[in-house]
Image (cartoon, rainbow, N blue to C red):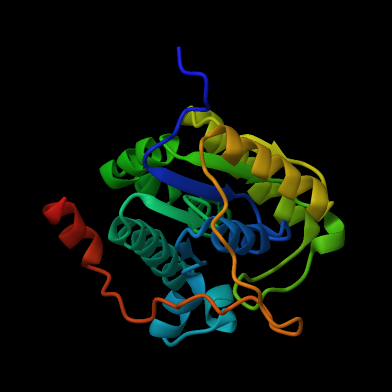
Amino acid sequence: MSDGPAIWEPMRIYFVGSHATGKTTLCRYVSRRYGLPMISEVARAVLAEMETGLDALRTDMDLVAEYQERVFARQVAVEKLHDGKFVSDRAFDNLAYVAEHTTNAAAMMNDARFLEYMKWVREGIVFFVRPHQSLLKEDGVRAGVSWDSVLRIDGMVKLMLEQHRISYLPLESVSMQERVRTIEFVLDRCGLRPTEQKPRPRAQTIPPVPQISSWPYALVERADNEA
């Protein structure tokens, strides 16, 4: 029996949940503290590539379906570009929005790529960040932001976690300090150690996360073939 904590390889860390939870803030913190590549939300990049906006998504159900399919495909493709080590502010989350806003949820959730991806997520470390009404705000990407919608998405994410037997740790507190303490405790027990951080000027903000702006939609299939 080992005296020290087990070291998990690969180290894939996910923050899942609805909007109005602070997932991206936590993701950035973990990325900086532990020196892990960060996969930021890909939805904005896909929205820009499709040269569309919120107004169009609100009125065109077919366009919403295409958009969500691309978002999911992009997430899978970008994850495969990393060598098994990253932190992401989403995983399968956008499938909850598919169920909320489109009619093709059943087709996407029964797709072999989705089922395989859920097995992949199951092998990572998953933090389920719960929403708080005090954090609710329009984020410029999702249409119809409302507290009722947030709760429905939160419930759908939880349902998918349970259905696919994905172990997760819920982050219930609105306190950033309590969230961070919980995350650090878990990652420490998994054998992950903070990287040496260089001092930064006091006024400097968190470095911007590199944006994926031009990956082709077909990259998912190419990545699968090369795997």
- Find residue 28 and report its horizontal and vertical position in percent: 60, 64
In the displayed structure, 19 sits above or below 157; it is below
Q: Residue at (54%, 60%) from the top-left corner?
A: 31
Which quadrant of the view contains residue 126? top right
- Find residue 188 and report its horizontal and vertical position in percent: 59, 38
In the displayed structure, 166 sits above or below 157; it is above
Whether residue 53 sits left or right of residue 140 in the image: it is: left
Which quadrant of the view contains residue 208? bottom right
In the displayed structure, 91 sits above or below 46; it is above
In the displayed structure, 226 sits above or below 207; it is above
Visible residue check, residue 50: no
- Find residue 151 and report its horizontal and vertical position in percent: 73, 49
User: Which one is in front, 124 or 128?
Assistant: 124
Q: Quadrant of the N terminus?
A: top left
Farthest residue, direction left: 225
Whether residue 172 sits left or right of residue 197 in the image: it is: right
User: Which one is in front, 38 or 121?
Assistant: 38
Farthest residue, direction bottom: 51
- Total numbered circles: 0
User: Which one is in front, 72 or 148?
Assistant: 72
Whether residue 198 sits left or right of residue 136 in the image: it is: left
Farthest residue, direction right: 134
Farthest residue, direction top: 1
Visible residue check, residue 42: yes
